[in-house]
Structures are given as structure tokens and as C-alpha cells.
Amino acid sequence: MAGSTHTVTNQAPPLTGYDVFTSDRVLTEAVQRHLAAGPREEALAELSGLGRGCGSLQTQEWGAQANAHPPVLRTHDRYGHRVDEVDFHPAWHRLLGKGVSAGLTDAWSRPGGHVRRAAAFLMWTQVEAGNCCPLSMTHAAVSALRADPELAAEWEPRLTSRVYDRELRPAHRKAGVLFGMGMTEKQGGSDVRANSTAARPLAEDGAYELTGHKWFCSAPMSDGFLVLARAPGGLTCFLVPRVLADGARNVFLIQRLKDKLGNRSNASAEVEFAGTWARRVGAEGRGVPTIIDMVAATRLDCVLGSAGLMRQAVAQAVHHCGYREAFGGKLVDRPLMRNVLADLALESEAATTLGLRLAAARDAAEGGDERERALLRLAVPAAKYWVTKRCAPVAVEAAECLGGNGYVEESGLPRLVRESPLNSVWEGAGNVQALDVLRALGREPAALDAYLTEVGAARGADHRLDAAIRDLLTDLADLAAAEGRARLLAERLALVLQGALLVRYAPPEVADAFCAARLGGDGGAAFGTLPPTLDLAAVVERARPVA
């Protein structure tokens, strides 16, 4: 009998069987900070239950399976009838069912609902980001439908349901529904005003017939879609049901599915409308204002999704380096690797802290707080621009912390790397966000006032933050011909806001390191260039997931 050729040593165990929520100190602290005493204990218990599910081996396997088996388009049945259906691996349906039952489409039914959902969404992204797309759009659709109280009364209970029903049948016969969205067209891209889909009014009040196409239609297996089309009165928002009330399939021709870099489990399609029945949402000519709240909600989910991807990447890197030995000791204890891990941890903590603060602002705005609503108008596009931009370099650097192991699919890091650019592109790429920041600054003075009040709460606590606020005020004093520097403005707005939040809420060693490297210019361009005089060991330990 042949002898053993090797033994397995010096390998980290898999990061599984742990509570993704309670092992994330930054996230748990944010939830405790932003929830009132009444709902806090219930929320912490509920999120811990979801956290244990996210960290379980079974759920992690579902995520890997859904990603490894992308959806398949079936345009016709065996007899030649047009069906336009998308088939998914069973793991996809299991994940969607868990996500819906966890309340990821319902931030509206209880106090602090947006904070609670944001924490859950950030965790669920770490399991499998693709299924978060329909969850996000279903959640966000509620905002748009409220422009039409009658439609909202009909559809909101289905959208916020905790029941996942995968069957295609009339919505009134379902306990829960999912929504997708279609705005982008070939000729326009992010310029939705170049929309050419035509909407012809029908005899029935509020009903229209659509003719046209959508170059990107997310989650085409959904029960309904919010789309933009050009009615006689101008660009208008419409609800397109997948199945009509009498049980007939609406005309919804799926031409092909996109073959994407990442987000492989989720279907993104090109669709054609040819006599497609639709119901108007809001007034004719008010399509963009009607759908803008939905877009704001999905943009916040981009921030939360990127924060979740960064958290998982950092957790995997710190976990690996806590076990792996090299050069005479644990990697996590080597000064240079500790510097890299601490730098990554700063980026992750800043993203999570900002994302949860914006979710808390959403809760307050829903309660009528106009200052918080104004803060969101400026802070969401700035955060969406910056946090999503930081996700890809964090994921790549975290994979490198695992060395060659991080380049192997089984580690899970390549999936994070492929997913990492998506949120920067989805719901308006970087330039769109930067220009939206300029619009908010130029047209809505209350937004800047709310932002300055927020960062001003931290003034006097760190001289580097104070200097960054002064420099920002100088930048904002002259917005004439500012388009060419819009990205720099968005970046500085986000960084100053992150710095202010960390100075107020994070441990001193975290705030000190962030202000030194991100605001004070004491770090380099690459990760792992923090000043060695900082308490980097404490920063890394705070990011360690406790399995």
C-alpha cells in the first residue's frame, strides 16, 4: 500500500458555522445606535437569527450553487408557444424564499424598519449578491407606487409580504410578489430622457399599450415591472404586470439574457414590448419624479450591498491570516500584513457606518423629518459614488491576503471580486452620481445645510477632520463650471461624512487611523500604507469574525 505523500497543515479552517451579525461589531453597534429602545431587543434577536443562517454551511452552499448554475432562458415551450420564462437552480429559489421571509422586501411595517432591513440586506449580500437584486427592487417599488394611492393599496401588501411565491399567475391570486425595473434603452443608457418606448392610451382609465424595448431589464422572472415610456403627455412611469388579471400572459418578450462579469445567479434581460398592457403610475409627463424615490432606495442598497461585500472580503482575509503561519509567526501578527488588514478594515467600517446612518435617515424621513430627507438627497449619491468605487480594490486586496488560495474559486474570493464592480455601475455609474451631487448642491440648499449640520456635529474632535471640512467649504464656495471636478467633490463629501461619523461613533483607534490616512494624507495610494504609529492591532482585532 502506498504511503501518504503529504499531510494538510497550516491551512485556515473554513469560515462557517458562525453568526454573521454578532461577529460584526460595527454592524451590531450601528443597529443599537440607530434603533430606539422599544424595537431594539427584538431586532437584535431577529438579526442574530438571520446572522446564524447567513453563516451556516447550508446557506453558503446554496449561494455557491446559485452562482455556479446561472439562469437559463426558455422562449418557447415544446409545442412552439411563446412562454418567455427563466429557469433557475433550486438554490436560487431557496435563497429568495429566505430573503423574503427575513423581511428584505419590507422596511415599512414597523418602527426602525429601514435600519433593520439595511442590516439584514448587508448580511444577506455576503451569502449571494445576485438574489439581492429582486429583493432590492421589490422593496424600492413601494416608494414609486405611493404616487398612486389606489395602486399602492392594491400592490403594497403583496410587495411587503413575507411569502415567496415563484409561480407565474395573476397577482391577485398570490400571497407575495416580486418586482423588477426597466428604464435603460440601447440609445440612451443612463440618459432616460432619450427613452423611445411609446405608450398609447387605451379606453380603460389609466391603461396603456406599450411598444418598444428595454436594453437592461432586471429580474425578468418577476411578477411586475416599473418602466418608463413616452406617453402623449411626456415621459411617464408605468406598471407592467407579467400576468394579466384574467390569467393571460402579458406581452413580455425576453430576447436574451445578459452574460455578465459577475452577478451570475441573477437574470438580466433584453425585453421587447409589442402591444404590452400597462397601468400608469402617477401623472403623464412625471415619470422621472415618480420613479426617483425608487431609484434613491436602490442606490442606498448599492451602498449597503458594497458594504456587505467589503465586510465579507475583510472577514475572510482576517480569518485566514489569523490561522496562517509564515516567516516565524501568524500572518495577522506580522507588521506589514497587519497594516494591510487594518487598512481594509477601515474601509469596511466606514462603509457600514455610513450605510446604516443613511438607513436611519430614511426611517426619520418617513416619519416626516425634513432635515433627514434633505440629507439623503445629497448624501445618497455621494455615498453611492464613493463606497461602490472602493468595493473592487478592497475585494482584490483581500483576495491577495489569501495568496494563491484567494485566487481559487473554492475560497469564494473570486466571486466577491467579480461582484465588486457591479454596484458602481447599477442605478447610474460614477459620473451619473457625481452629476447628481452637483444638481443637489445647485438646486437644493437644504441638502447642503443638512449635510453641514451632520458633519458639524463632529467638529473640534480631530484636527484633520476640521481641516478637511474647511477645505470642503472652500471647494463648495465656487460651483461654477464644476462638472469637470464633480467626482472629486463627491469623493470629498463622502470621505468627510465618513470621517465625521467615525469620530463620533467608532473607537478612537479607528477614527484616528481613518482621519490620518483618508483625510490627513498620511497614507499611500495602496492598502497597507498606514502610519505604523497607529494602533493597528486593535483595528484588525475589531474586524475579526468570531466563528
Image (tube, grey):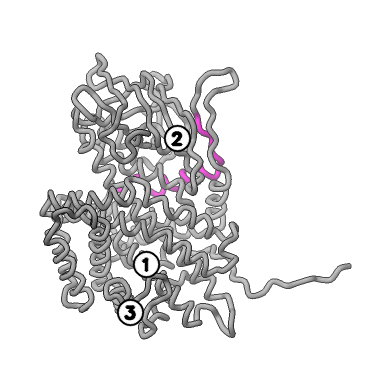
Label 3: few (<14), some (14–19) or many (≥20) C-alpha neighbours in 10 Å = some
- Taking the image as shown, residue 159 lies to the left or right of residue 474, namely right
Q: How far apart in space, not on screen, are marks 1 and 3 (Cα)?
A: 14 Å
**What's the magenta region?**
85-107
Whether residues under marks 2 and 1 lie with C-beta atoms below 8 angstroms apart, the answer is no
Q: Secondary structure at mark 1?
A: helix
Taking the view exactly as shown, the residue that stands out farthest to the right is: 1
- Taking the image as shown, residue 70 lies to the left or right of residue 197, namely right
The x, y position of residue 222, in whole percent, is: 42, 34
Q: Which mark is residue 251?
A: none
Which badge, 2 or 3, is on the more N-terminal residue? 2
Amino acid type of the residue that numbered disc 1 sits on in the rendered structure = Glu
- Nearest to the eye among marks 2 and 3: give it: 2
The x, y position of residue 383, in whole percent, is: 28, 57
Amino acid type of the residue that numbered disc 2 sits on in the rendered structure = Ala
Which badge, 1 or 3, is on the more N-terminal residue? 1
**Residue at the spot 33% in from the left edge and 41% down from the top edge:** 160
Residue placed under numbered mark 2 in the picture:
269
Q: Which mark is residue 509?
A: 3
Q: Which mark is residue 347?
A: 1
Q: Is residue 507 visible?
A: no
